[in-house]
Image: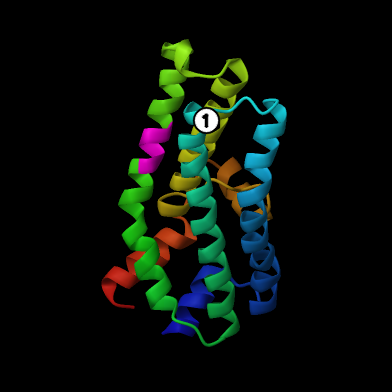
Amino acid sequence: MAQRKFDMMADNRTRADVLARLEPYWKMEAGNVVVLPLVMLLLSGGQVGWVSLVPMAAMVAMLVIGALYWRGKVRQLKGEAQDWPGLLRLIARLQVPVLILTLLGCAAAAAGWLMPDLARGTADRWSATASAVLAVLEYVNYYHRQLQHFDNKADFRRMLAGKGFRQSWMARDLAGLKRGE
């Protein structure tokens, strides 16, 4: 069953091709946990307050979930011993809390623009907005629809052909967990 599922996901690519494509994802997401907040801090001249910190926390939470998921997925495809169903259950349990945090981050960013005195300045508001947008995009990209299409020719062609966004890998794995696969 697991091999057949892998074959369907791989769309006729070899296991090595899929692993070569997916291996960097968890590293990229884990690196972005540190890099993105630092970039925002530097670009804002250190002018970040709670208006930025709330959406930044949502963004970081989604990046951590992404790093955990992709590391687990790579290990699963390599056949390495791990608790894949346990990881998926954890990620499923985090869906509602991280959605709430993301919505709070959006509210904080909006509050910074609607009530400018709440923010530490324009840079704080822009940092909050960027963090909120990234958190929302990551939430959708992981829990619902694959938004990233630039790294795979087949996905990019599918998008250009107007076939829409496919269900994300993580959403498919979470749905399989619910079905008991």
Query: Which sits in the foreground, 17 or 99?
Result: 99
Query: Which sits in the foreground, 143 or 131?
Result: 131
Residue 112: % across, % down: 46, 19
Describe residue 143's horizontal placement relative to residue 93 as left or right: right
Tell me if residue 126 can be seen: yes
Tell me if residue 146 can be seen: no
Kindly state the secondary structure of the residue where label 1 is placed.
helix
Q: Which residues fall within the magenta stretch?
A: 101-105
Which color scheme did the rendering employ for the protein?
A: rainbow
Quarter of the image with the N terminus in it: bottom left
Residue 103 sits inside the magenta stretch: yes
Residue 29: % across, % down: 61, 55
Which residue is label 1 attached to? Answer: 52
Q: Residue at x 66, y 28 (%)?
A: 46
In the image, residue 86 sits, relative to residue 129, either above or below, namely: below
Quarter of the image with the C terminus in it: bottom left
In the image, residue 67 sits, relative to residue 111, either above or below, namely: below
Q: Residue at x 52, y 88 (%)?
A: 81
In the image, residue 71 sits, relative to residue 99, either above or below, namely: below
Badge 1: how crowded within 10 Å, few (<14), some, or many (20+)?
A: many
Residue 45 sits inside the magenta stretch: no
Residue 45: % across, % down: 70, 25
Describe residue 27's horizontal placement relative to residue 4 as left or right: right
Query: Which sits in the foreground, 83 or 21?
Result: 83
Indicate the amino acid at tag 1.
Answer: Ser
